[in-house]
Amino acid sequence: KILVCFDVGAFIGVITLAMASRLGPHDKVFSFEPTWSTYSKLLDNISLNKYKFVTPKNLALSNSSKEAIINITKDPGQSYLLTDDQVAKDWLVPDNSNYQEIVDTQEISVDTIDEFTKRKKLHHIDILKIDAEGQDLNVLRGSNTLLKSKNIYYIICEINEGLVSLLESYDYDLFYIVRNGDFLVKDLNDYPYQSYKKPLNVLAISPKAPAFVNGQGLNIQQ
């Protein structure tokens, strides 16, 4: 069986390389990074490690296929995609002090996971990691066909209410990743806020996943 991994918002490739290090030459890693400055470093890192089965894409993923604008911030790791509504209003700077200074804008191509996998004749994704600077929910919305069929087996993404509701509606089992910890929690009411940082990411497991059914085998705080 060929293993397929997607790294959405790959930046310079830390997770991409970690995925590739555990896979064989007949497996597939698709690495998506829309910002050109970091994409070029991603290419360098893939080349230096000689991972020929990694396919890099200078592409954003969201809930529709289109051309869009991305704001490039001083810290390129925080660059973010503008929505259609924001572009229509010529809105370039969000009212949010957490965003860094914008140094440039870039026109990019946007695709959906469903359309991309259809073109590539991929019928499943083993691991989908998403770090898309506010677009995580839209990335998942763009994978509706695969989610409906439960054929994305493991998903790691940032927590937000809409995203959690979407995954639960497809019967995914959710486990919250304890930051700076080595275990997971099933219920955020049990999250050890006093000792660890606020939860940021969630691990979602499909009912069709080949391992960790009902969390069995995972290090879960009881």
Image (tube, helix red, strand yellow):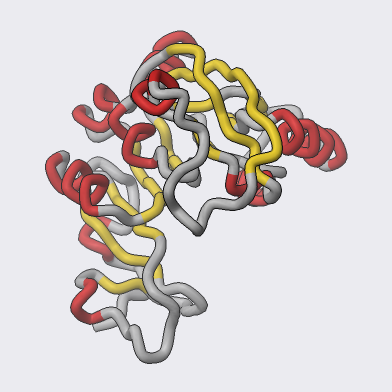
Q: Is residue 149 above or below residue 208?
A: above
What x and y, as percent, mark residue 168? 16, 48
The quadrant where residue 47 appears: top right
Residue at the image point whose x is 34% and y is 24% from the top:
85
Q: Is residue 206 above or below residue 58?
A: below
What x and y, as percent, mark residue 82? 46, 30
What x and y, as percent, mark residue 183? 40, 76
Does 173 sit left or right of 23 as displayed? left
Residue at the image point whose x is 54% and y is 23% from the top:
69
Does 133 sit left or right of 25 as displayed? left
The quadrant where residue 41 appears: top right
Give the farthest residue toward the right: 48
Of residue 149 and residue 133, the one placed in the foreground of this image is: 133
Q: Is residue 22 visible?
A: no
What x and y, as percent, mark residue 219? 37, 74
Residue at the image point whose x is 28% and y is 30% from the top:
141
Does 39 sit left or right of 4 as displayed? right
Q: Is residue 88 above or below residue 78?
A: above
Quarter holding the C terminus? bottom left
Give the farthest residue toward the top: 119
Residue at the image point whose x is 52% and y is 26% from the top:
60
Give the number of callouts: 0
Q: Is residue 131 visible?
A: yes
Of residue 138 and residue 217, the one placed in the foreground of this image is: 138
